[in-house]
Image: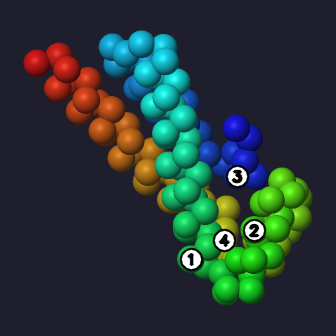
Amino acid sequence: MKYFYTHLVEIESVIEELDNLDLSSEQKVHLASLIDSSLHHTILDAIFSELAESDKKVLLNYLKMDDHYQTWKFLNEKVDGIEEKIKKVAEDLIVELKKDLKEAQIGKNR
């Protein structure tokens, strides 16, 4: 799925780790979907924690309309360094996910 922040977040390395696991295609697709969802919710949580209640409602409307331009315009007006904050929270989660996938692979090979 393409989100307003997709250009900031690289998940290919996580997908590569996922591909190293001995799983069926269906299982890989399911896990990739869970990874995407986890990343999305983590990013949204980080963004919403920076906003006032009234701003959260405005952002939800932009997200609902899937208006990436207005979403970015709004976020840049309301949150200093929002792109860096999104990158940081995404990178932290990706590191954790890759670590978990490597551990799963090692555990399976024992």
Q: Which of the 4 image quadrants contains residue 106? A: top left
In three-dimensional space, the C-alpha distance between marks 1 and 4, rounded to whole angstroms, equals 14 Å
- Image location (x, y in percent) of residue 76: 78, 72
- Return the residue at label 2: 60
Q: Which residue is mark 1?
A: 49
Sequence-first disc among 4 and 2: 2
Relative to 67, residue 10 above or below? above
> Is 73 placed above or below 68 here?
below
What residue is pinned by disc 3? Answer: 5
Label 4 belongs to which residue? Answer: 81
SS category of the residue bearing label 1: loop
**What residue is rendered at 49% in x and 29% in y?**
30
Q: CA distance from mark 3 to mark 2?
A: 15 Å
Q: Secondary structure at mark 3?
A: loop
Mark 4 crowd level (few <14, some 14–19, many ≥20, 10 Å Cα)? few
- N-terminal of the two: label 1 or label 3? 3
Looking at marks 1 and 4 on the same chain, the residue that comes earlier in the sequence is marked by: 1
Disc 2 marks a residue whose amino acid type is: Leu
Q: Between tags 1 and 4, which lies in front? A: 1
Q: Residues within 10 Å of mark 3 (few under 14, many from 20)?
A: some
The quadrant of the image that shows the C terminus is top left
Sequence order check: which comes first, mark 4 or mark 3? 3
Q: In this figure, which colouring scheme has been used for the structure?
A: rainbow
Query: Position of 78 compared to 25: left or right?
Result: right
Residue sitting farthest toward the left: 110
Given contact means CB atoms under 8 Å apart, are the residues at marks 1 and 2 in contact? no
Foreground: disc 4 or disc 2: 2
Residue 88 coordinates in the image, percent (x, y): 52, 59
